Amino acid sequence: MATSGTATFDLNIDDLIEEAFERCGMRMTAGYQLSSARRSLNLLFSDWANRGLNLWTIEQATAVLADGTTTIAPGADTVNVLSAVIRDTINGQQQDISIDRIGRSEYLDLPNKLTKARPSQFYVERTTTPTVYLYPTSDKAYTLVYYRIRRIQDAGDYTNTSDVNFRFLPCLASGLAYMLSLKYAPDRVGLLKQIYEEDFQKAALEDRDTASVHFVPQIEY
């Protein structure tokens, strides 16, 4: 028996919305329903940002630090900055030196934020447009290498595919169906919410780093 030989299945926004409405026991009959569904889809993406890490939205970024740099702007689409290193060239060899993330109160308590040295700490101010504060202020040119969580891209045109890993497509369909049921099929809200939460849990459990972890007990004498 022959197989397709491909593994490229995806859903464009139009097909995704149609699938969600069918799960609500209805079909789209008006243009405003399509617009309403796209709005709900974008709200669903925002909800996922609040639920935890989505590994496909974690990406590495760099920023060039000049002498005296105190802050960098990781971009308006940044949800959070997870970790960072200072990249320097020492004796002709590139070295990445880890720096620690600190909280708002710890950064505020630093007595002289303009002290110059190689940065060893950073604080992320999570406003509408996030800012990363470095301490100490860089005393020469460095490169800051960091991992950030970016926002899931908007749905956009109905012919687009979603900015979602294929493993989350069932969750995306059930999540959109649940959100549409709040407006169009209140009798199915409970059932669709349960299906959505189960689909999200299964996808979230798989969406994790699978590197080996070893726990070594500390023995004191």
Image (tube, rainbow, N blue to C red):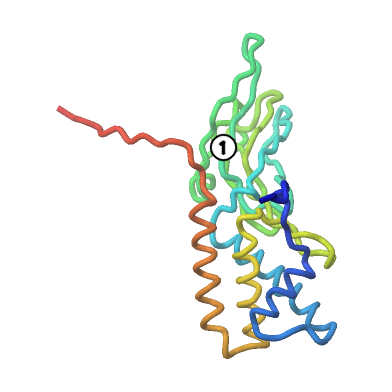
Q: Residue at x 65, y 53 (%)?
A: 165
Q: Residue at x 70, y 86 (%)?
A: 26
Three-letter residue code for mark 1: Asn
Q: How many marks?
A: 1
Q: Is residue 112 left or right of residue 45?
A: left
Percent of width and height locating residue 39: 74, 74
- Identify whether 108 is placed above or below 121: below
Q: Where is the C terminus found, in terms of image quarters?
A: top left
Of 97 and 164, nearer the camera is 164
Of 151 and 80, nearer the camera is 151
Q: Residues within 10 Å of mark 1 (few under 14, many from 20)?
A: few
Percent of width and height locating residue 11: 74, 62
- Identify whether 213 is placed above or below 17: above
Percent of width and height locating residue 79: 64, 54
Q: Residue at x 62, y 35 (%)?
A: 114
Of 12 and 184, nearer the camera is 12
Percent of width and height locating residue 71: 68, 41
- Residue under label 1, please give it: 112
- Identify whether 82 is placed above or below 28: above
